[in-house]
Amino acid sequence: MKRILWLYAMAFCCAAQTRSGQIADRMLAAVGGEDWERPYPAAASCANRVPIQIEIYATVQWTQHCSQTSGGLIHESFYYVFGEPARTAELRVDLRPVDESPQFTADLLAALRSRLTARLGAPGHAPEMMEIGFRHLRFGQPVNGDHWKDGPLDYFLHANQSSHSPMGMRKGVELIVLHDRLMREWAKDGVITQLEGMGVMPLPDDAVPEAPVHNPELLWRTWRDSPNTRAGEAAFVALENRGWNTDTREGCPANPDLFREVIQRGEAFLASHPQTAFRKQVLYALAVANESWWSIARAPADDPIVSAPPYPRREINARQAGAARSLAIQYYRQVVQLAPDSPEALSALRRLPRLELGFDTGQRRFFCSYC
C-alpha cells in the first residue's frame, strides 16, 4: 500500500514538473514572439488607463493595458507614450500562470530560472523596482528575484506578493519583461520623482537662505515688501509652490482650485519681472497648474481626490480645460527650451507626449483636497 501511494506521489510530482516546464516554455516563447514597440491595437481585451497622482514612476505610467488568458497562462501587455514623435508603444509584458499554488509556483520558478540561466547566464538581483514587485522581502537581504539582460530586453523573475496595478494582489510566479526604451525612461525617475513626488519645485541654493521658505506669514511679508529683490522673488516662488494657500489651519479653502491663482499670479509675475532668475521655476509652476486644470476637469465622478471637497467651479473649469491643456504644453515647451538639462525639463518631457496625444496624466497639483 505504501509503495502504491509513493508511486502516485511520484507520478503527481512528475506531472507537475512537466506542466511547469510546458508553461515555462510557453512564457518564453511568448516573449520571443512579441512585436515590441508596436502601437496600441485597441482590441476588445484592452482598456485605457485611468491615472492617479501617486503613480509617478515610469513603469506604471502606461496609457493602455491588454490582457488575455489561454491555456493556464495570463499574458498582459502595457503600452506607453514616451519621447517624440509622440506615439503609443508596447514596452512591457507581464506573464504569469493562473495556478498560484505553492508547489506549482516553486516548480515554475525553478523551470524558468533554469531555462533563462542556460540561455543568458547567471542572474543578477538588481535593480530593485518596488513598483513591479521586484523587491527586498526583509531588510538587509538581497532582492528576492532574478534579473537577466538580453539585448534590448530586461527579464525580471520573482514570486513576491505584490498589489501593483492593474490586476490587484498577485501571489504566483511573474515574468516581467521591460523594453530598453522603458528602462531608459525609468532611469530618469530618481530626478523626476524628487521634483514631482515632493510636490515642491526647488529654488537655487543661494536663494533659499534669503527666503523664509517654511513660514507662510514671513513669505507674504517678504514678497509684499520686497517684490523686486532676489529674496522677494524667491518668496514668490515659494508661495507658488504652496498654491498660495497660506492658511495653517486644517481643511481647504472655500474653492479648492488653487491652480487658478497660481496661473494668474504666475503670469502677472513674469510680465512684471521679465529678467527674473526664477523664470524656469515659474514657467514650470504655470505648466503644472494648467495641466492640473485640464486633468481635474476630466476626473471621473468617483475620483478620490477631486470628489472629496466641494467643487463649485467644476462645470466652468470643464469648459475651459482645452485651453488649459494647450497652455500646459506651451509652458512645458518653454521650460525645455530654457533649461534642457534641468529636473523640470525631464519632468516636462515625460508629460508632454501624453498631453499632446490627449492622454490624461492624473495631475492633481494645486488642487486642495486634503490640505
Image (tube, rainbow, N blue to C red):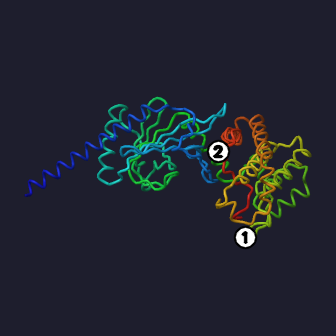
Who is closer to the viewer here, 270 or 251?
251
Who is closer to the viewer here, 149 or 328?
328
Location of mark 2 (residue): 192
- Residue located 43% across and 35% down the image: 31
Name the residue type under label 1. Answer: Glu
With respect to residue 126, does 237 lie above or below?
Answer: below
In-image side of 228 versus 17 (left or right): right
Name the residue type under label 2. Answer: Ile
- SS at badge 1: loop
Location of mark 1 (residue): 250
In-image side of 249 versus 151 (left or right): right
Place residue 62 in its image quadrant.
top right
For the C terminus, which image quadrant?
A: bottom right
Residue 369: x %, y % from top left: 70, 63
In-image side of 183 versus 362 (left or right): left
Per the rendering, the mark at residue 12 is none
Residue 168: x %, y % from top left: 49, 55
Residue 73: x %, y % from top left: 39, 44
Place residue 302 in its image quadrant.
bottom right
Say whether marks 1 and 2 touch (CB < 8 Å): no
With respect to residue 243, does 184 lie above or below?
Answer: above
Q: How crowded is mark 2: few (under 14 residues within 10 Å), some or many (20 or more)?
A: many
Residue 110: x %, y % from top left: 31, 43
Q: State how far apart marks 1 and 2 are (Cα).
A: 29 Å
Q: Residues within 10 Å of mark 1 (few under 14, many from 20)?
A: few
In-image side of 229 versus 20 (left or right): right
